[in-house]
Image (cartoon, rainbow, N blue to C red):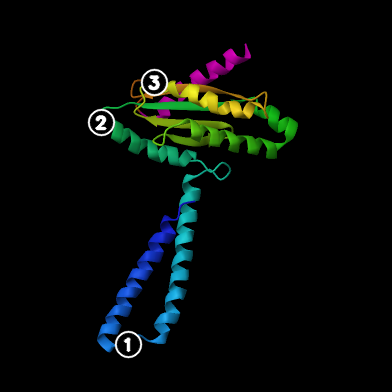
Amino acid sequence: MKYKGRIVTFLLVLGINSIYIAYYFFRDGFISRMEYIGLPILLALAWWFGRQYDRAKFFSEKDALTGIYNRRFVEYIFLKIKARADRKGQEIGILFIDVNNFKTINDQFGHKEGDQLLMIIARQLEKAVLNTDIVARWGGDEFIILSPGKANPTELLGSINLNLKVISSSYSDISVSVGTAIYPAEGKTLDALLPVADKKMYNMKIRLKA
């Protein structure tokens, strides 16, 4: 969770209070004891209110289980990424990722172990991509990656598979199926692109089972 709300409110209250104290000091030549007592209280309140903002922002953008971005954020940020890509004449690579045999983990070891696996996968996906890429949990055992400026999102597959190998020692039956789509060649909206990526992902899943 970032500290932006807390830092902004803290500095804002500190700045306003400092101006207030300086004004009365130059006007009256002294600072009352109440000013010294009141400042720590005001700063504590500012920090608390800032924390409420940070919490609200975090849970509106992040998945509660894995800590990566959630579906709502992807739907919001895609429009911004799309507008920037249009201005620069760039493409956007989309990877739709589904965890194979995830139900087996839940059935054999329980949902707690399944949740742990999802958190591990989320961390490994973040390690596999660039800082400019967006990694999010789409829902259940599905993840999505938005890769601005990537004409060929399959370039990320090697990095993803390499990072997911660390899981195989603990979860030997776990692998992922990945489908890709490219904006704007295969769709102009997220709603149009996702079925393309989903179909490719499903075809990969069938090939792995064959």
Q: Quadrant of the C terminus?
A: top right
Query: Which amino acid type corresponds to the residue marked 2 in the rendered image?
Result: Lys
Task: Look at the image and give the residue range highlighted in magenta.
Answer: 189-210
The residue at 45%/81% (across/down) is 37
Q: Where is 2 relative to 134, above or below?
A: below
Query: Which amino acid type corresponds to the residue marked 3 in the rendered image?
Result: Asn
**Secondary structure state at the residue bearing disc 1:** loop
The earlier-in-sequence mark between 1 and 2 is 1
Q: Where is 209 relative to 184, above or below?
A: above
Rendered image: mark on residue 7: none
- In the image, farthest residue toward the right: 108
Q: Which residue in the protein does label 3 denote?
A: 152
Q: In this view, does 172 lie to the left or right of 16?
A: right
Does the magenta run of residues contain 195?
yes
Residue 194: x and y, percent? 45, 26
User: Do the residues under discs 1 and 2 have CB atoms within 8 angstroms?
Assistant: no
**Secondary structure state at the residue bearing disc 2:** helix
Q: Which residue in the protein does label 1 denote?
A: 30
The residue at 57%/18% (across/down) is 205
**Secondary structure state at the residue bearing disc 3:** loop
